[in-house]
Image (spheres, grey):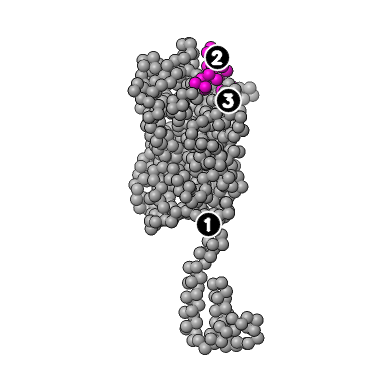
């Protein structure tokens, strides 16, 4: 309509200027002819003003028409100027988004600062984002954290969709997280879990309550650091070193900082002012982490130089053995740069990828096992059932092995139910669209930040009965799995950006939980009622319990099964 008016105004102006108006030209349109009769008598000046005014109206009204035509998703009206809905999302955005979705729907649009954000809260719309529009929604938003701490987005998790991301992800999948590599490193995981069990046993002998958060964190960290660069930071026979404690603290800090709602990420023109003061904190954490990572890389470079001088004397068999013994950092150092195919991978890229693996691999598994223990303490019948299954399948003369997990069906269901109610990354990692798409009939333009709220999806009434209850038996006989094909259960995401560490993460969680349940009877310290356990979580990238779980364990297997093995790597 507005366009049409502008069109006839311009036509009139054109005719007026040329002073060669011909009746014939406008005969086909009576409204135009009437208008032109008036226009013929108007001054050139008033005509120009009218055109300018109409163009302005067009400029202002056109987006409204477009919105009507393209139908963007409903959402809360942004009350705050400049900030939009940012101040209302609180410290636990997944919970706020969940409550808002009850009012506005499972595809909801929010204005966060100057950023357009869409929140997805149901399995069918999660499928549209992560499957139907997988490629269009496969990028990540730019974030100050990723620039300051993760070497300018040279890693996998924060890298924009493109060649660098593709190359680095493939490298991780093939050289660290492949089934072959996982098989090769399976003894190492078994050892670390045995160390944890022994540690808990020693403490429970003395009747002390164990801080499970710490134990699980240290175990998961040892697993990942040994797989990535063959180094154990935590040794349960000794007091942990200041270096190990600092590394652990840094990994935790990284996970917190990566998840903060930083104004600069949502209102880019405020970036230079850093109003919340995050940049100095990120810089400090980043440079401390860099010292650790640089040392790891330097040691590997030194080792590879000394090995290469002896290379001439090796036969083929020895070379093959050496390939097997190489760790992930050795492999990265031996690879050509992705972009050029020659030279070496940039050192900062190598450090960024190591950082990703340690942070992503440690926190997630530890958080899940802690939540599983909490839920089992609150649901003793489920704990008993799991232990009965373990006694039945494993007996009491040996410990659980990774190869046993496929037979422990109820344990698998407990892990699924824990992932459902406590997904370690409740909002996955934020996605960003690189093109336009339509989800649930709503238009999502390019450059929209997309939050798939796994926390809400997992509680969706279309997917689960009594969704707020912890009930592992809901998965008995069900084919729902966490592999990214069932959109009602997405702890690892789905599609191109899905977690590449799924196999490692899942087996670590299952093995740790199986060993802990098989080895001990669990109770809370005297005077505490399981129903009073504080269930609040904090959100960084992941969502662990606010208060770490302290428990008292009693051995339930013959004592010789609590000895720690010799370390083989
Ligand atoms: C219980 C364990 C784990 C859970 C629940 C988990 C969950 C997730 C989730 C939800 C995402 C984001 C998916 C998305 O944005 O769509 C992710 C990404 C990622 N995870 Fe995991 N993860 C776990 C363990 C691991 C491990 C052990 C590693 C590696 C050692 C790892 C490495 C990564 C990386 C590199 C990404 C980024 C992928 C990309 O952007 O392409 N994760 N993870």
* Drawn side of residue 234 relative to residue 503, left or right: left
Are the residues tagged 2 and 1 within 8 Å (C-beta)? Answer: no
Q: Which mark is residue 72?
A: 1
* Drawn side of residue 29 relative to residue 562, left or right: right
Residue 473 at x, y = what percent? Answer: 55, 29
As displayed, is residue 226 above or below residue 255?
above
Q: Which mark is residue 409?
A: 3
Looking at the image, which residue is at 58% across and 34% down?
A: 481
Residue 300, visible in the rendered structure: no
**Residue 375 on the magenta span:** no
Q: The magenta stretch spans which residues?
A: 384-403
User: Dot 2: what SS?
Assistant: loop
Tag 2 residue: 395
Looking at the image, which residue is at 39% across and 49% down?
A: 88
Q: Which mark is residue 331?
A: none
- Compare marks 2 and 1 and give the one earlier in the sequence: 1
């Amino acid at each position: 309509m507005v366009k049409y008016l502008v069109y006839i105004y311009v036509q009139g102006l054109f005719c007026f200027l040329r002073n060669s108006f011909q009746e014939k030209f406008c005969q086909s349109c009576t409204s135009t002819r009437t208008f032109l009769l008036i226009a013929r008598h108007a001054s050139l000046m008033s005509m120009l003003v009218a055109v300018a005014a109409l163009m302005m109206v067009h400029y202002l009204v056109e987006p409204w028409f477009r919105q009507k035509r393209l139908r963007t998703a409903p959402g809360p009206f942004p009350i705050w100027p400049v900030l939009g809905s940012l101040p209302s999302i609180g410290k636990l955005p997944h919970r706020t988004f969940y409550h808002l979705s009850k009012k506005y729907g499972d595809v909801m649009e929010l204005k966060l600062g100057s950023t357009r954000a869409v929140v997805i809260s149901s399995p069918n719309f999660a499928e549209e984002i992560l499957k139907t529009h997988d490629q269009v929604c496969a990028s990540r938003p730019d974030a100050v954290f990723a620039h300051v701490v993760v070497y300018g987005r040279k890693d996998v998790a924060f890298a924009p969709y493109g060649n660098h991301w593709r190359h680095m992800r493939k490298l991780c999948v093939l050289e660290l997280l492949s089934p072959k590599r996982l098989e090769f490193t399976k003894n190492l995981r078994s050892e670390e879990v045995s160390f944890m069990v022994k540690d808990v046993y020693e403490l429970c002998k003395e009747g002390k309550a164990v801080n499970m958060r710490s134990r699980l964190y240290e175990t998961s960290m040892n697993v990942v650091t040994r797989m990535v660069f063959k180094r154990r930071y935590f040794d349960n026979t000794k007091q942990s070193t200041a270096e190990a404690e600092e590394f652990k603290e840094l990994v935790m800090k990284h996970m917190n900082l990566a998840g903060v709602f930083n104004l600069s990420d949502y209102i880019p023109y405020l970036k230079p002012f850093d109003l919340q003061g995050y940049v100095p904190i990120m810089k400090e954490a980043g440079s401390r982490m860099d010292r650790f990572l640089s040392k790891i890389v330097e040691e590997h470079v030194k080792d590879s130089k000394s090995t290469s001088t002896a290379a001439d004397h090796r036969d083929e068999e020895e070379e093959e053995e050496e390939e097997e013994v190489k760790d992930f950092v050795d492999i990265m150092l031996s690879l050509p740069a992705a972009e050029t195919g020659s030279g070496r991978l940039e050192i900062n890229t190598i450090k960024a990828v190591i950082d990703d693996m340690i942070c992503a691999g440690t926190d997630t598994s530890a958080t899940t096992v802690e939540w599983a223990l909490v839920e089992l303490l609150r649901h003793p019948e489920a704990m008993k059932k799991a232990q009965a299954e373990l006694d039945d399948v494993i007996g009491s003369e040996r410990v659980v092995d990774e190869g046993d997990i496929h037979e422990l069906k109820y344990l698998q269901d407990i892990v699924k139910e824990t992932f459902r109610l406590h997904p370690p990354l409740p909002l996955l990692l934020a996605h960003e669209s690189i093109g336009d798409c339509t989800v649930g009939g709503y238009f999502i333009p390019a450059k929209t930040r997309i939050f798939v709220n796994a926390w809400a999806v997992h509680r969706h009434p279309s997917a689960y009965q009594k969704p707020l209850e912890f009930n592992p038996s809901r998965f008995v006989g069900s084919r729902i799995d966490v592999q990214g094909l069932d959109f009602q259960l997405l702890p690892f995401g789905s599609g191109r950006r899905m977690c590449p560490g799924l196999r490692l993460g899942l087996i670590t969680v299952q093995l740790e939980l199986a060993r802990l349940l098989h080895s001990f009877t669990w109770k809370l310290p005297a005077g505490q009622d399981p129903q009073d356990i504080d269930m609040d979580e904090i959100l960084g990238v992941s969502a662990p319990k606010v208060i770490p779980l302290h428990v008292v364990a009693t051995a339930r297997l013959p004592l010789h099964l609590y000895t720690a093995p010799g370390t083989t790597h």
